[in-house]
Image (cartoon, helix red, strand yellow):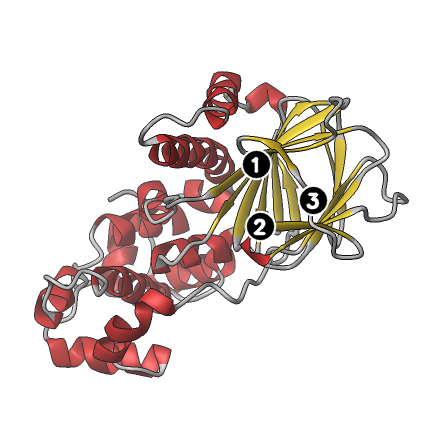
Amino acid sequence: MDTLTGLLDGARAREAFLLRTVLEPPFALRIQDEAPLSLVAMLKGSAQVIRDSRITLNPGDVAVICGPQPYTVADDPATPWQTIIHPGQVCTTVDGTPREHLGVRSWGDPSGGGTELITGTYQLRSEVSRRLLRTLPSMLVQPAAGTDRTLVGLLSAEMGRTAPGQELVLDRLLDLLLISVLRSWLAGTPTWHDPIAGTALRLLHAEPAAPWTVAELARRAGVSRSLLARRFTELVGEPPMAYLTGWRLALAADLLRDPSLTLGAVARQVGYGSAFALSAAFKRERGLSPQDFRQHSPDMHFTAYDPGPSPVVVLA
């Protein structure tokens, strides 16, 4: 498993919420649905996405918005809120009156507006996906020039259909759009191309169960142990062995959701010599045993997000 695949593999939509919004300026939507990850694709017109900072979306642009914190989509920052999107994708006016839909997965101005956008939201439970989210900025924008317009067009066309299996088709199209944006972002992130830290990351993701040490990673990268440790920590934000522990336990958490796998089998797949060793590490890091995690994981949701040092990134 390469670094990119390892980070993106858990980000899979399952009955994701998709909505086409048609608006006539002035408009302002307050999004407080608490979704851990959302995509906004502009089809027509323009809009401001406002959180701690502000970005402008034009036709063809796609934004990835991370974390459950609320944000606003408006024609102008000064426009007062008119519609609020609540958890469960309930749409109301500011005073709580329900808003009517225009049709299949569509809402907005019934006369047709100058602005049209698609919003897709994920409810991620994968531990690997949580690790991906922790690496992302608060808002990430893929300009139209780098966006797969065919994919956006196909998603838009499929949203109006109600054929058998339609939810699955839409989930996979949303996944492809997300992956296309994140792949561009990761490809341009210096960490993954760094000859020292990037090499170590690729090794850890390709063989998480291998008996890695700082000395072996340094040997494979062709540098000293001190240089490897310093460079990795500077770029990744934690030492190599701490990163490996977190990656292994994230993989283990995903594997624990498969009831057919024994704890010993999970331990072997992620590099622990025994079920006892995995249990000790898991409980030390997460505060509960693998058995307790397996029992309660279906009800666990993503609740925390650290946007990191760069809250907004616009891809070239």
Dot 3 crowding, Cα within 10 Å, few <14, some 14–19, many 20+: some
Disc 1 marks which residue?
19
Query: Which secondary structure, mark 2?
Result: helix
In percent of width and height, residue 48 lies at: 77, 38
Q: Which mark is residue 99?
A: 3
The CA distance from mark 2 to mark 1 is 9 Å
Taking the view exactly as shown, the residue that stands out farthest to the right is 78
User: First in sequence: mark 3 or mark 2?
Assistant: 2
Mark 3 belongs to which amino acid? Answer: Arg
Q: Quadrant location of residue 275? A: bottom left
Q: Are marks 2 and 1 in contact (CB under 8 Å)?
A: yes
Q: Nearer the viewer, residue 85 or 61?
A: 85
Q: Earlier in the sequence, mark 2 or mark 1?
A: 1
Three-letter residue code for mark 1: Leu
- The quadrant of the picture occupied by the C terminus is top right
Circle nearer the N terminus (3, 1): 1
What is the number of the mark on residue 243? none
**Residue picked out by circle 2:** 89
Identify the residue at horizontal 36%, vertical 60% (top origin): 127
